[in-house]
Amino acid sequence: MSDRRTALIAGLLYLLTFAASIAALPLLDPVLHGPSFVTGTVGTALVRLGALLDLVNAAACVGTALVLYPVLRRTAPVGGLGFVASRLIEAAIIIMGVIALLTVVGLRPSDPSMLPTASALVALRDWTFLLGPGLMPAINAALLGTALWRARLVPSAIPLLGLIGAPLQLLSVLATFFGLNTQTSPLSAVAVIPIFFWELSVGLWLAIRGFRTSAQATEVDEPLHHLATSD
């Protein structure tokens, strides 16, 4: 596979993770925020569709790493392999959350005695959401951002966003993990902004422009890389 095609597929997969994960949220809302979902009569078709989109997201996550690895291993084999492992873990956690929600759907229709079970399963999904789409993107950004920075396959500003966002997102997730923050707090909203634009810019750049040549990298990024190495 040519590098241009590799970049196109990786970029489209990155954009697919955005589309699938964002579209899934409103569809899953009834089961996530409706304690009486298991005793209700509202249809489950939209919730099932949301779960399917989360599975698509998980598959696309793994796809981005597998497609990019042959390119990354040329200049950053350890970072590339680490990115594959990180994406696999992220996908596994997302799938665990999907299974929890589908189990709640499977309890329908049920009597009120099943509400504690349903609540426990939703709580499990909340934790998978924190540790999957919350924590793992910070690790992904640190690994892939470093690899792309060194290989200079994209403009330096793009991996720089990821390298700035990774510690911010990590601190936000750890604060939530220890009960000092929530996933819907202003801190969480601000911390996720660099990661959001990092992943979006990677997807758009790879899909539209592809990997840069050595000459392009030298011409545009030499001053920034010289500054970084001189420090």
Image (cartoon, grey):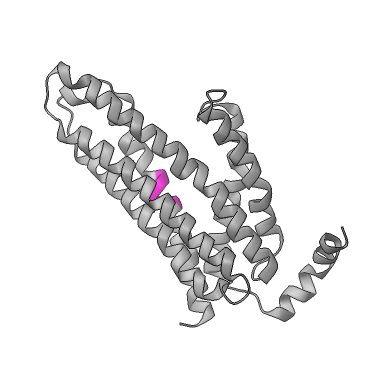
Q: Quadrant of the C terminus?
A: bottom right
Horizontal and vertical percent position of residue 206:
55, 67
Residue farthest along the top direction in this orientation:
112
Q: Is residue 122 magenta?
A: no
Q: Quadrant of the N terminus?
A: bottom left
Horizontal and vertical percent position of residue 21:
40, 47
- Position of 26 with respect to 4 (left or right) is left
**Residue for point 67% across, 79% down:** 213
Q: Quadrant of residue 61?
A: bottom left
Residue farthest along the front direction in this orientation:
78
User: Exactly how many numbered labels are in the figure?
Assistant: 0
- Position of 72 with respect to 119 (left or right) is right
Residue farthest along the bottom direction in this orientation:
2
- Report the front residue among 222 and 173: 173
**Residue for point 14% across, 30% down:** 108
**Residue for point 59% across, 40% down:** 170
- Report the front residue among 210 and 81: 81
221 versus 159 height, above or below: below
Q: Is residue 36 visible?
A: no
**Residue for point 54% across, 26% down:** 178
Horizontal and vertical percent position of residue 63:
41, 64
212 versus 110 height, above or below: below
Horizontal and vertical percent position of residue 193:
60, 42
Q: Is residue 19 magenta?
A: yes
Magenta extent: 18-22
Q: Main secondary structure of the magenta part?
A: helix
- Position of 157 with respect to 5 (left or right) is right
Q: Is residue 58 visible?
A: yes
